[in-house]
Image (tube, grey):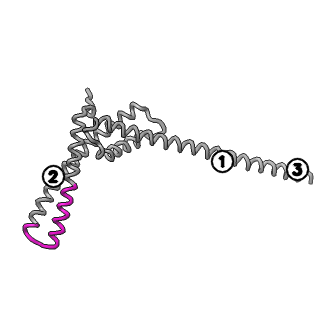
Amino acid sequence: MLTIEYLNNKVFEGNIAKFKQSKQDKARYELIIGDLDESHKKVKSLLRSELLKKKQNEYQQVLRDYNDSQGQLAMAFFTLSENIIRYRKFHFVDVDDAIQEFVMICFEKIDRFDPKKGKAFNYMTTCILNHYRQLYRTARNYNELKKKYHDFLQVQNEGINIKARSTAITKDKFSRAQ
C-alpha cells in the first residue's frame, strides 16, 4: 500500500522549516569560517587554529543536515510535481523537463513561504501550476509562431514557383518557335 507523505502538510511544513533553518546555519557558518580564516592568516595563533578547526567540524555537520533536508524536500517536490502532471495531463511540454523545472521552481520560491499565511502544500501547488501556465503559453506561442513562419514560407515559395513556371512557359514557347 502506497502512502503519499507529501499530503501530510505538517510534515511538509516541518521539512521546509528544517531546510530554511539549515540554510541559515550554513550561511552563518560560512561567514564565521571565512572570518576566522582571514584572521588566522593575519595572526597565526594556536587558539585561532583550534577554533577554526572546531568551526570547520561544526560546519561539516551543518552541511550534512542541509544536504539531508534538501534531499527530503527534493523528493517531496518531485512527488508533488509528478502527481500534478499526472492530474493535469500537460500538453506542449515535455513531462520530464517539466518535473525538473517544477522542483527547481519550488526551491526558488521556498524562501517566500510563510506558514502563518497559508499551507505549504497549497503554496507549492500554486507555484507549480503558475509555472506550468507560463510554460504552456510559451510553448503555444512558439508553435503559433512556427506555423505563421511556415505559412509565410509557403506564400514565398508559391510566388517563386509561379515566377519559375511563367519563365519556364515563356522559355518553352520560344524554344519551340525556333
Q: Which residue is mark 1?
A: 153
Q: Which residue is mark 2?
A: 61
Distance from disc 2 to disc 3, alpha carbons, whole Å, reads 90 Å
Point out the stretch of residues depicted in magenta.
Answer: 27-48
Q: Amino acid at mark 3?
A: Lys
Residue 100 in the image, given as x and y percentages of width and height: 37, 44
Give the farthest residue toward the front.
117
Camera-nearest residue between 90 and 43? 43
Which residue is located at x 20 percent, y 49 percent?
A: 22
Secondary structure beneath dot 1 equals: helix
Circle 3: element type: helix
46 drawn magenta: yes
Viewer-proximal residue, 167 or 41? 41
For this view, does 34 lie left or right of residue 90? left
Residue flagged by tag 1: what amino acid is it? Leu
Q: Which quadrant does the N terminus fall into?
A: top left
Relative depth, front residue between 11 and 158? 11
Prevailing secondary structure class for the magenta stretch in the rendered image: helix
**Number of other residues with Cα within 10 Å of mark 2, as a class: few under 14, some 14 to 19, many 20 or more:** few
Which amino acid type is shown beneath numbered disc 2?
Gln
Q: Earlier in the sequence, mark 2 or mark 3?
A: 2
Q: CA distance from mark 1 to mark 2?
A: 61 Å
Q: What residue is disc 3 on?
A: 173
| 109 left or right of 61 in image | right
* Displayed quadrant of residue 146: top right
Label 2: element kind = helix
Spot the residue most to the left: 47
What residue is at 16 percent from the left and 73 percent from the top?
42
